[in-house]
Image (tube, helix red, strand yellow):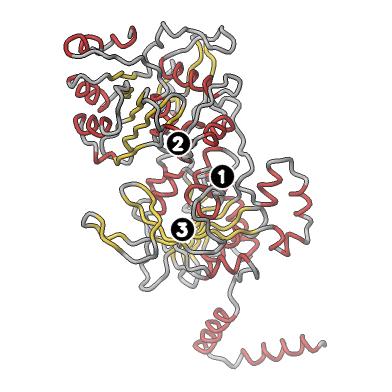
Amino acid sequence: MSEAARKIAELADMLSYLDDNEKKELDDILRVELPIWTPLTGPQTAAYETPADVLYYGGSAGGGKTDLLLGLALVEHYSSIIFRRQSTQLIGIQSRLLDEILHSRKGWNGQEDILRLPSGRRIEFGSCNNPGEEDKYQGRPHSFKGFDEICHFLESQFRFLSGWKRSTVKGERQRIVCAGNPPLTEEGRWVVNYWGPWLDPQHPKPALPGELRWFSTIAGRDEEVLDGTPFKYKNETITPLSRTFIPSAVQDNPFLMETGYEATLQALPEPLRSQMLMGDFRAGTEDSAWQVLPTAWVEAAMARWKPEGGQGRSMDGVGADVARGGKDKTCVCTRHGNWYSTIHTWPGKDTPDGATAAGVIMSVTRDKAPIHVDGIGIGGSVVDHLRENNIHVVSIIGSESPPELDGEYDKGTGKLKFRNMRSWMYWRFRESLDPKTGENIALPPDSEMKADLCAPHWKLTTQGIIIEAKDDSLDARGNVIPGLCRRLGRSPDKGDTVIYASRITPKIFLTGQNFRQKVRKGSWRSV
């Protein structure tokens, strides 16, 4: 008998002399001394120990991102939930936990997707395949929320689910940990803006990996603040939350390095190789073949923009997308030739009616610039108020027919018509962005605006080019066609504002009755 086998036999004999209470005490000691899971030395330990309220861990593939989420749920928190965007994607992470880490399915309820451990810990798994499904998790307490592959989630889903973080155990820490690789599509680029100090190379105040920064949401916008000290804003006490980003790589995971996984990542084509192997958030995301505005064209327009570009130039057009209450924003963009201003925004609650919205639009308008407003909903009231005050305003109704005087065909082939006004405006803006046209459009650097502009898709029908609708619609058989708002997870307010501002409408230099006749409903087309 070996020395190790002899000692095991002696321990087994000693255990027989312990009563039930002593066995339980020994079991508790072993549970503390020998945890189910421990982090790998290096970035995973740094992520495990960071005091950040909201952590993004990852970047490249193979750095132990999913295991970090499972480990925190197993040993640090009593009520945890781990999300994947699609429910079918949960199978792999559940198998990793039950079959490879715990080697047991005791306490597992597959109907509820919940694991209940003898220690009293509870680990739930959740998903929200479609926008709006996140509502089912409202009000359910979890001290730990983990998001696996965070770039697959809509920003609206992440923010909603993050808002329901709390603990029923006194003194228990609460935190959010996101894991993932760089986004593969434009719709996932919101993470670069959310963790801007670490991921955005153009950020004015870059942060080091693991460095804490504090943020508060004020009037619907994230604002970086000095520290976590609570402060008052409009009679409300706001407590800033800390964020950080800790990068990981396959080289940090000795278990995967032994399998040759690094060579697999090295063989990937670009930009996947840079994203998955190097964790490069600057590597290009993949455009859809049916994306109306190519990302490269929008980025080139943003690279041309200079803050002083509008100085000394007449204001030629204004675009406004109006919100009344809710989470949407009232947005206004002004155009000076081919130069577009930064987007002026107001929370929807600050523009509760047409008169107020008309006032904020006029506050940034000059030079008798025509104002283009989405004429649906509250926008109709805004149009009425502006017209009553002899302001040159154009009501944009996306479902109406495009104007005849500008030409009914696309400029590229001269053969493609447009289904409606929305399709015509987006396509004309696409043509002005095209590097071959030489118009040199200059757009302000704004990640949300960029996402809005790059999100819409197009298709060719027997009635011409049609751009993806904002809201859900029905086809001829009564089936629901999901709109852009559902796919994007929010209304593309900033993008639409730029499109409205791009509308070229000659100015009217008349007054009194003649002016009112010119701007009466419908007559703007012939101006």
Numbered badge on residue 145: 3
- Labels 2, 1: front one: 2
Q: Can residue 411 be seen in this view?
A: yes
Amino acid bearing label 1 = Thr
Which secondary structure lies at badge 1?
helix
Q: Is residue 271 above or below residue 420?
A: below
Which secondary structure lies at badge 3?
strand
Q: Is residue 492 visible?
A: no
Residue at image location 38% in from the left, 47% down from the top: 136
Q: Is residue 9 left or right of residue 34?
A: right
Q: How far apart are marks 2 and 1 (CA)?
A: 32 Å
**Residue bearing mark 2:** 449
Q: Distance between the residues labelled 2 and 3?
A: 29 Å
- Labels 2, 3: front one: 2
Q: Is residue 381 above or below residue 167?
A: above
Residue at image location 26% in from the left, 60% down from the top: 232
- Mark found first going from the N terminus, 1 or 3: 1
Frontmost residue, 191 versus 38: 191
Residue at image location 42% in from the left, 44% down from the top: 156
Provide residue 279's location: percent of width, then percent of height. 64, 51
Amino acid bearing label 3 = Lys
**Residue bearing mark 1:** 88
Q: How far apart are marks 1 and 3 (CA)?
A: 19 Å
Q: Residues within 10 Å of mark 2 (few under 14, many from 20)?
A: many
Amino acid bearing label 2 = Met
